[in-house]
Amino acid sequence: MDLFIKDRVEFILKDRDGELVLIKKRVYLVGLIILALIIILLARIFFLAVIQNVHYTTLSKTNRQKILPIAPIRGLIYSSDGVILAENKPTYSLEVIPEKISDIDQLISKLREIIHIDEKDVERFKRLSNKNRRFERVPLRINLNENEVALFSVNRHLFSSVDVVEGLNRHYPLGRDFVHSVGYVSRIDESDLKNISKLGLDSNYSATNHIGKLGIEKSYELYLHGEVGFQKVEVNAAGRVIRVLERTDAKPGKSIYLTIDLSLQEVAIESLNNKKGAIVAMDPRSGEILTFVSSPSYDPNAFSNGIDNQLYQSLLSSKEKPLINRVIQGKYPPGSTIKPFLGLIALENGIKNVAEEVWCPGWFSLEGHEHRYRDWKKQGHGYTNLSKAIIQSCDVFFYKLAYGLGIDKIYKGLSRFGFGQTSGLDIDNERIGLLPSREWKRRSKSQAWFPGETVILGIGQGYFLITPIQLVKATSAIATNGLVVKPRLVLGINSPEEKGLTLLSDNIESQISLKNDFFWKQIIDSMKSVVHEVGGTAWRSGLNAKYNFAGKTGTAQVIGIDQEEEYKKEEIPEELQDHALFIAFAPVEAPEIAVAIIVENGGGGSKVAAPIARKMFDNYFMNRNLISKE
Amino acid sequence: MNEYLLGYRIHIDFILLFLIIILCSCGLVLLYSASGQNMNLVYSQMIKLSIALLCMILIAQVPPANLDRLSLSLYIFGIILLVLVIIFGDIGKGAQRWLDLKIVRFQPSELMKIAVPMIISSYLSSRFLPPKFLRILIACIIIATPVFLIAQQPDLGTALLVAVAGFSVIFIAGISWRFLLSIFILFALSVPILWHFMRDYQKQRVLTFFNPENDPLGAGYHIIQSKIAVGSGGLYGKGWLNGTQSHLEFLPERSTDFIFAVLCEEFGMLGVLVILSLYLLIILRGLYISYYAQDSFRQLLASGITLTFFVYIIVNMGMVTGQLPVVGVPLPLISYGGTSIVTLMAGFGILMSIHTHRRFLKR
């Protein structure tokens, strides 16, 4: 109360004019302070906007401008006659960036309300998410149909993190028939990324999702891929593209024409009729592979967006081993198909029994040994010379021949034909088989070479393992009197900007020269008689042919038969039955095509393998009008 | 001065009104660009401006003496509302600021921007000036109570402005320099204690301010993007509707707190000079009104309101240019938003009332 009264007094006694002057001074002061602060502010803006303008302009540009890569269109793959084997099909897929999703299961259950997503899709998505590049889209559903695309578009606003992506998917119209040669592409994974980095191709692959994993798709990847394009775009803070500022188009990949002749390939596939085996045909002059069949096969289209685990496991564990490329990875004993080569080596080395006739009683024993090496013909061939030994496939003759040559000469001679080495075919993962030698046995088995092992080498048994591609390459070398040519699957490369095909050149490896060129004729004549002379092991296959061809049958044992046991086909389970082999080339006078045929567990080469060669030659020459159609 | 002049009869200061309308028009043009050519937002802002102008004209009719008498009840009313907000308030953007009055959502803290300078002016002008120590202390308590309540919401920006509004009145009332210095020292000493009581997000803002690059995608993002907008604008700007920072959404809060960055980016240093000149003219007009006011209450209130308006501007621009921490202070009359515009216009209404209710002495 006291305070209140005093205040009243104060209010009455106030010096009003004096106060006004005091406050006016302060207002004046405030005005000055305000001006000073505004000048400081302007100085700051001047500093940012004028002095540091270049710096901030750059920052502003990098903020909004992004360089986005454009994936090139992958080159196509054709057969030699221009039939498409690998193409790009437009597809729609539902894609998600895994790093941007917090609860994928919830997203999937929400998506399932409008679009069918099955467990396989989810499983694939999770698998791909784990090995994908970070912050790259991963497909959740592939091959959406138009209805599904429309349905999703309507509900697009509910799924901000999901996109329908229009893309090109690799498609193989003749998938199964060509997977072992053409191969397939699949999504780029971590190990591919490392390889790409190693080659310094990171930027070229910056927009690419798929890469060749097998076959031609893999080995000609650099031609097929093309060159990446770029567009400079303006993006907003959310990274969405607002407009394109500049654009450099991608250069599509080059197309590849294979050497494979489609109709010949189909004849081979049909003849093999899903049996396990391999058929390979080659032009002996150029090395062009005309037929490339490994059976059974599988569908490469399942791989392009990540094969589902169950299917992959079933392919992997299948007894028939469809994933193995039998032409370059199948290792088989050559059986009697090796005999013409041994004959040539013997002629070249001039060993005694080549010129002489040998008595064949149906078996052969090494001196001082009990063991009888049996001939396939129990009663024997009687007196046999080299020619007869090839025509009738006399085992005893070749036991003696091999024994006479010895392992070292055999090894050296067969090496010249390419056995025990990769053929140099232009796709990866080729096996070298096994051409045994003294040195090899010491190294791998720590044992000396036994003479008995040389004996069975004479009929292509024992340690000796060949691949079909080696066999056809060696056969071609006989056909061309010793010209060894590297086989190849690619005829030429077609770049979109240049017209016409750039043909790949032949790759001649070596010329086997013999002391006497007549040796070639001698062996070739014998092989011709195998098919064209009654009593030849494949004479039925040569009947009524409008051209001359030369061949050699082979029957490779899968299991050893005991001394006294009979080989009875009926009693042996299928997977242990003999492999049927046949090598041939035609026409004898000027060979254009050589084949190697192996039918696993097929039985005899003459019955099973030789007729296939005949069908193929007929087709080959009919298509080239060399024989009249009657 | 002529008592028959129209302005004095209808209690409107045409100079101030003219400047405000020019500034608001510039603001609408800028808002159209900042909102991404959203005409609806511009219409909405126009309606808010019209309502606010109406408030201004109505308040200008109230004689300053009545304002003096009203100040205590307004202050107490405001305090009650602030307490209610803390108890019942709606939560928006992580802070409890709004009181839902069914018809309009109301931010009581805005009311305090007017009520605090009013009560301080009234309280100090009723006694001898310059004020004595005890009265300054009481005035400080009067200011601190709403500031504390607003800071609890938490709304650091408004709390700061309310405090500035109150203390600027005390300063103009002629507080001695020695006293001011000791307050400053006291404040400096209390910084560590204040720091202790700050919320985490407030600490974060301060830390980020000192080193925005530490957290470029989180708390530092605002400052970095805003500086890029200001810096890339240059002398002449990128042109209206051509600002990449704002149109491509790099700039956050671009139609509200960060609209000044849009101005800098699109109109450059020159645009800034134009807008700043308009602001300066309004401030000078306010100070002029204060200078020539006829009693100490009017002087104190007019300069308090003008100073608060200035602090709005300097804090907002300082924040956008990276000189001050990010506190939620809009750019007055330009930023999009309702309540703050009404408060600002109410302030200008008071200025007009002070200037046009004059006692004319016949000579």
Image (tube, coloured by chain):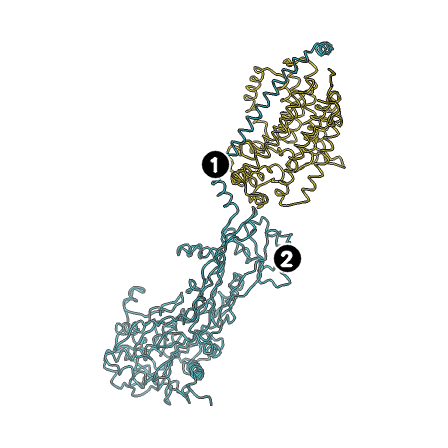
Q: Position of residue B199 (x, y in %)?
A: 59, 31
Corner quadrant of residue B286? top right
- Residue under circle 2? A153
Chain shown cyan: that is A
Task: Point out the frontmost of discs 2 and 1.
Answer: 1
Position of residue B51 relative to residue A263, above or below, is: above
Amino acid on which disc 2 is placed: Ser
Determine crowd level at label 1: few under 14, some 14-19, many 20+ residues with C-alpha closer than 10 A: some
Q: Position of residue A499 (x, y in %)?
A: 43, 70
Label of residue A623 in the image: none
**Foreground residue, A610 or A27?**
A27
Labels 2 and 1 share a subunit: yes
Q: Position of residue A286 (x, y in %)?
A: 36, 75
Determine crowd level at label 2: few under 14, some 14-19, many 20+ residues with C-alpha closer than 10 A: some
Chain shown yellow: that is B
State which chain disc 1 sits on.
A
